[in-house]
Image (cartoon, helix red, strand yellow):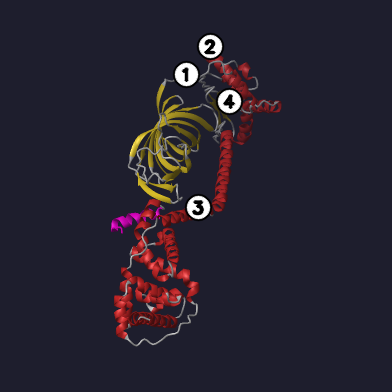
């Protein structure tokens, strides 16, 4: 990562179209940006495409960065929006998921705490796109229902519903995994 | 488990996740996309700018034509000046002023003491007479006018002051002949012929030479011929300042593309007739892309390994300051546009700039970009050859356009040491 003055210099260079500055920015934020895009995509290739599209927007729209947000926040917003734009067509796909009631809350908590990030990511990636996006935006990024509704062009009710279903599916997957491990199923 | 806690665990775990590390292929792809975007971004401007430039050019041509027409009208009008005093005296002054080949300044002054009622008539007739128009009808009218004047006022006094400064001696017959062919210069011829001989001999003007004009009897040379002063070899003077804008095309052996645009200040001063010494300070910026690095003097070239071969290097900003001194010779043509040629020398300071090198792996065609940066470098650029034209556009201003060629004299030229360019200047004369 770059320190504050370096970042300012790099942003100034990017505004002038300086390729060296653009390379420094890309180098500095590539891993960070790809960690964001990972959560909204279903495979590595799609993640890379989102990162590339996001950085392309950053370089071509950097004049619009006014400094009211931190650069990281601005970059994150662009990356998230890029991922959502990419999957917007699939966001409204009807999810036909059947739920089973999760009874054992203790098992769930234990599983989650012990699970590594990679495993949780795989679970989130198994969600339908609309659930995945809603869950990420609310649980990870911290957006409010209304903001998510605006971003996804859906109603607040849909957001709440999708979020509920996303959580329930994740809990179910986590519990089943724990039970499978415990009883060797 | 509460939903909040559930979400928090996910958020915590995800925020710990490292993303995918930086990939050179990713940057290579990105760089290409940005290049394509920048090319596309300016493409729309051509259909807009082209008609705009066309309009500007047409406007300039129109303005110039109007200006020229006005100037021609003024020149025609300034050949003679007629002053009328509406009292009982009419004074007419005719001035013929001709530069260079003949320095001739002839003033004819006539005074008529006439009555108020006939003033207008005499004015017309006297004017015709004074200019001795070459047409017979006009001469008759002229004679009639004089006769009328004599009849109406016996006390008419005529005084013709002749002042002639002849810089070319007697060799001006051809020019005088030319003048004679133009309406309104006939008197000049008569006066010149008479005056040259009369002033040299110091005798009165013979009235017979002014056959159609009875005023000839009163002609007296009132001023002796002023001898021409010899011009000194060195005539330091005529200082001028100028602002300029220019375009430069770097002539690199392996250039892919590149240009410079700049603006500057300059000054010049005349050293001797038509020769002046000038100095310029110019700021340039531009971009350049080339295949080879041999002209990149003082720049550290990165070495990514033997598998990699340089594809090209590129500098997106190339800020430089140049300072030049030159001598120019103004070709003395009596045209609206004055041509000139010049020679000089130029130095340059490269301000620090970034360079990007693109290498390609010979085995797998993987491209990598390596950045580099230069330090400020100052060195002698080369010799300048210039040629241009200039035109006065006002009492204190001139406009000029010029082409220039910069050549490095030496074995190892730098990236901008050989250039061909154009400049326009706006001069201010003190």
Magenta segment boundaries in residue numbering: A1-16
Tag nearer the camera, 3 or 4: 3
Chain containing the residue with disc 4: B
**Circles 2 and 3: CB atoms closer than 8 Å:** no
Residue at 54 percent across and 34 percent down: it is: B85
* Spatial CA span between label 2 and label 1: 18 Å
* Both labels 2 and 1 in a single chain: yes
Instruction: Say which of marks 3 and 1 sits in front.
Output: 3
Same chain assignment for discs 3 and 1: yes
Find residue B156 and name its label: 4
- Residue most toward the front? A184
**Quadrant into which the N terminus of chain A falls:** bottom left
Q: Nearer the viewer, residue A51 or B288?
A: A51
Where is residue B231? Give x, y as percent.
44, 20
The tag earlier along the polypeptide, 4 or 1, is 4
Pointers 3 and 4 in contact (C-beta within 8 Å): no
Chain letter behind tag 1: B
Residue holding disc 3:
B39
Q: Earlier in the sequence, mark 2 or mark 1?
A: 2
Picture coordinates of residue A127 (x, y %)?
43, 76
Q: Is the residue at mark 3 from the same chain as the one at mark 4? A: yes
Residue designated by label 1: B228
Secondary structure at badge 3 equals: helix
- Secondary structure of the residue carrying tag 1 is loop
**Residue that label 2 marks:** B201
Q: CA distance from mark 3 to mark 4?
A: 84 Å
Please say whether residue B278 is visible from this viewpoint: no
> Which of the two discs, 2 and 3, labels the residue nearer the N terminus?
3
B214 or B368, which lies in front?
A: B368
């Amino acid at each position: 990562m770059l320190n504050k003055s370096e970042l300012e210099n790099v942003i100034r260079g990017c505004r002038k179209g300086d390729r060296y500055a653009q390379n420094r920015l890309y180098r500095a934020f590539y891993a960070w940006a790809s960690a964001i895009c990972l959560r909204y995509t279903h495979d590595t290739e799609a993640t890379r495409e989102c990162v590339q599209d996001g950085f392309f927007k950053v370089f071509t729209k950097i004049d619009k960065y006014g400094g009211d947000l931190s650069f990281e926040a601005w970059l994150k917003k662009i990356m998230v929006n890029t991922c959502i734009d990419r999957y917007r067509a699939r966001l409204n796909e009807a999810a036909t998921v059947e739920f089973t009631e999760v009874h054992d809350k203790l098992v769930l908590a234990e599983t989650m705490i012990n699970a590594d990030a990679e495993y949780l990511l795989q679970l989130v990636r198994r969600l339908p796109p609309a659930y995945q996006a809603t869950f990420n935006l609310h649980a990870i990024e911290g957006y409010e229902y209304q903001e998510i509704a605006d971003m996804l062009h859906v109603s607040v009710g849909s957001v709440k519903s999708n979020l509920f279903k996303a959580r329930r599916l994740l809990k179910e997957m986590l519990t089943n995994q724990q039970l499978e491990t415990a009883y060797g199923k | 488990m509460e939903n909040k806690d559930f979400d928090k665990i996910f958020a915590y775990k995800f925020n710990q996740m490292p993303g995918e590390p930086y990939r050179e292929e990713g940057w290579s792809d990105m760089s290409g996309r940005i290049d394509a975007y920048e090319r596309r971004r300016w493409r729309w401007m051509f259909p807009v700018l082209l008609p705009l430039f066309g309009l500007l050019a047409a406007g300039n041509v129109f303005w110039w034509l109007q200006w020229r027409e006005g100037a021609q009208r003024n020149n025609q009008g300034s050949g003679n000046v007629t002053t009328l005093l509406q009292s009982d005296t009419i004074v007419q002054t005719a001035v013929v002023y001709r530069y260079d080949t003949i320095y001739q300044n002839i003033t004819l002054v006539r005074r008529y003491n006439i009555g108020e009622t006939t003033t207008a008539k005499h004015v017309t007739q006297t004017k015709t007479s004074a200019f001795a128009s070459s047409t017979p009808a006009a001469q008759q009218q002229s004679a009639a006018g004089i006769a009328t004047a004599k009849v109406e006022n016996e006390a008419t006094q005529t005084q013709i002051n002749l002042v002639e400064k002849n810089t070319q001696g007697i060799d001006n017959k051809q020019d005088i002949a030319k003048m004679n062919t133009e309406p309104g210069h006939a008197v000049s011829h008569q006066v010149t012929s008479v005056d040259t001989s009369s002033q040299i001999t110091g005798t009165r003007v013979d009235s017979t030479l002014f056959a159609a004009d009875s005023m000839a009897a009163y002609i007296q040379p009132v001023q002796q011929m002023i001898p021409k002063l010899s011009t000194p070899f060195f005539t330091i003077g005529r200082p001028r300042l100028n602002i300029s804008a220019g375009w430069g095309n770097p002539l690199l052996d392996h250039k892919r593309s590149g240009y410079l645009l700049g603006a500057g200040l300059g000054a010049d001063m005349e050293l001797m007739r038509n020769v002046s010494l000038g100095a310029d300070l110019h700021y340039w910026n531009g971009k350049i892309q080339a295949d080879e690095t041999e002209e990149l003097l003082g720049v550290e070239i990165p070495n990514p390994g033997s598998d990699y071969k340089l594809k090209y290097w590129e500098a997106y900003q190339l800020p430089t300051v140049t300072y030049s001194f030159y001598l120019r010779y103004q070709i003395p043509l009596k045209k609206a546009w004055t041509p000139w040629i010049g020679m000089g020398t130029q130095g340059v300071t490269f301000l620090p700039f970034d360079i990007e090198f693109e290498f390609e792996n010979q085995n797998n065609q993987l491209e990598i970009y390596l950045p580099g940066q230069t330090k400020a470098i100052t060195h002698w650029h080369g010799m300048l050859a210039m040629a241009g034209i200039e035109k006065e556009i006002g009492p204190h201003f001139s406009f000029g356009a010029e082409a220039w060629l910069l050549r490095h004299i030496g074995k190892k030229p730098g990236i901008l040491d050989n250039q061909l360019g154009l400049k326009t200047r706006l001069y201010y004369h003190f």
